[in-house]
Each structure stands twice: as structure tokens, then as C-alpha cells.
């Protein structure tokens, strides 16, 4: 099992050729395990979706950081006109 973010565990069920995601806090199934079991096909689909969403989120974060660096900070000492 590999850990993601220190708590999410990802691995395989060798004899069933399935991918397992163990999620703490997830309501246990009939066998008492808190996990998501996927076929290889659906695991790839999930992985592709995660990569797609992560790429988009990273691009947004990079764009936001870039805009913050480029925009001047408001002058706090500016007097109001009037």
C-alpha cells in the first residue's frame, strides 16, 4: 500500500486484479473495511480525472500567484480626494 497525503492508502488486490483505495473516515462496507475497490479500467479513468483536475488546479494557482506578483500593492497612504 502506498500512502497519499499521509492518510489515503492505495494498493492492489493481487488475486482479484483490482485497485484498492482505503479512506479513513469512510463508512465501512459489509466486511468492515473503509475502502473503494475499482477495476483496472475504472482506476485508470479515476487516475486520468485526478491528473486532469490537478493540472487545472495547479495552473489556476500558478496564474493567481503570477498575477499577485505583477499587480502593485494598493498605496495605503493615499489620501481620499474631495
Image (cartoon, rainbow, N blue to C red):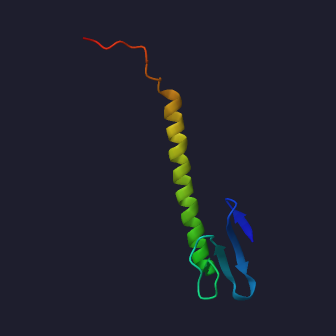
Examine the rendered structure and indicate whether residue 58 appears above or below residue 49.
above
Examine the rendered structure and indicate whether residue 7 appears above or below residue 34.
above
Left or right, residue 47 beside residue 78: right
Residue for point 50% across, 28% down: 70
Residue 34 x %, y %: 62, 77
Asked where in the image residue 65 lies, by quadrant, the reply is top right
Front position in the image: 47 or 7: 7
Quadrant occupied by the N terminus: bottom right
Left or right, residue 51 beside residue 17: left
The mark total stands at 0
Residue for point 69% across, 71% down: 10
Left or right, residue 70 beside residue 81: right
Residue for point 53% across, 47% down: 59
Residue 49 x %, y %: 54, 65
Front position in the image: 56 or 5: 5
Residue 26 x %, y %: 57, 73
Residue for point 61% across, 74% down: 43
Asked where in the image residue 18 lies, by quadrant, the reply is bottom right
Asked where in the image residue 41 lies, by quadrant, the reply is bottom right
Quadrant occupied by the C terminus: top left
Examine the rendered structure and indicate whether residue 79 appears above or below residue 65.
above
Amino acid at each position: 500500500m502506498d500512502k497519499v497525503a499521509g492518510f489515503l492508502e492505495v494498493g492492489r488486490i493481487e488475486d482479484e486484479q483490482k485497485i484498492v483505495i482505503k479512506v479513513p473516515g469512510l463508512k465501512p462496507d459489509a466486511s468492515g473495511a473503509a475502502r473503494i475497490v475499482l477495476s483496472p479500467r475504472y482506476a485508470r479513468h479515476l487516475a486520468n480525472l485526478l491528473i486532469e483536475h490537478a493540472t487545472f488546479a495547479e495552473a489556476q494557482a500558478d496564474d493567481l500567484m503570477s498575477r499577485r506578483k505583477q499587480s502593485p500593492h494598493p498605496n495605503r497612504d493615499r489620501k481620499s480626494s474631495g
